[in-house]
Image (cartoon, helix red, strand yellow):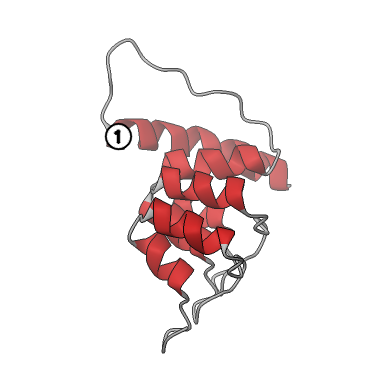
Amino acid sequence: SNVQNRTALHHAALQNEEQTVRVLLDAGITVNHANEEGNTALHEAARMGFVDTVETILSNAKPDIFIVNHQNQTAMEYARVAGEGLCASVLWNKMGLPLGKLEVPPRPKTKEELDDEFIEMFWKSYCDHRT
């Protein structure tokens, strides 16, 4: 790890280097290591919107998806706050929380439109579930 307490896995996740992430996980790197902000590599990939890297971490390791960073956010919450609805959805489903599937509209919407719609629906459902 370096000065910011980031491991090679953090760096690979932040750069969306999916193959490097897979190699590191196969080599046995600690998947739940937190950096100085309390973020795991899963937090970092989720915040950046790197869905493939998030899915690689989820499928090639057993990350604790309920770890919270120093802002008391899981990787799912970190992705939601960053506006990365697709990553938040992947993690939400992995947590086993009910949400259903997102409909694919006949006219493709922009990523921003989809994220805005999803985040509004998701946050309401998430708040209802936490109470």
**Residue 123 seen anywhere in this rendered image of the structure:** no
Q: In the displayed structure, would residue 43 be above or below residue 3?
A: above
Q: Nearer the viewer, residue 96 or 71?
A: 96
x and y, in percent, of residue 84 in the image = 40, 46
- Determine the secondary structure under disc 1: helix
**In percent of the image, x 41 and y 89: which residue is there?**
3
Is 42 situated left or right of 67 in this image?
left
**In percent of the image, x 52 and y 44: which residue is there?**
55
x and y, in percent, of residue 4 in the image = 42, 84
Q: In the displayed structure, would residue 47 be above or below residue 33?
A: above
Q: Quadrant of residue 105?
A: top left
Q: How many marks?
A: 1
**In percent of the image, x 41 and y 59: which residue is there?**
20
Q: Nearer the viewer, residue 63 or 107?
A: 63
Q: In the displayed structure, would residue 48 be above or below residue 93?
A: below
x and y, in percent, of residue 14 in the image = 37, 62
What residue occupies the far top of the structure in this picture?
A: 106
x and y, in percent, of residue 8 in the image = 44, 72
Task: Identify residue type, mark 1.
Answer: Lys
Q: In the displayed structure, would residue 123 be above or below residue 33?
A: above
Residue tagged 1: 111
Is 36 situated left or right of 33 in this image?
left
**Residue 127 seen anywhere in this rendered image of the structure:** yes
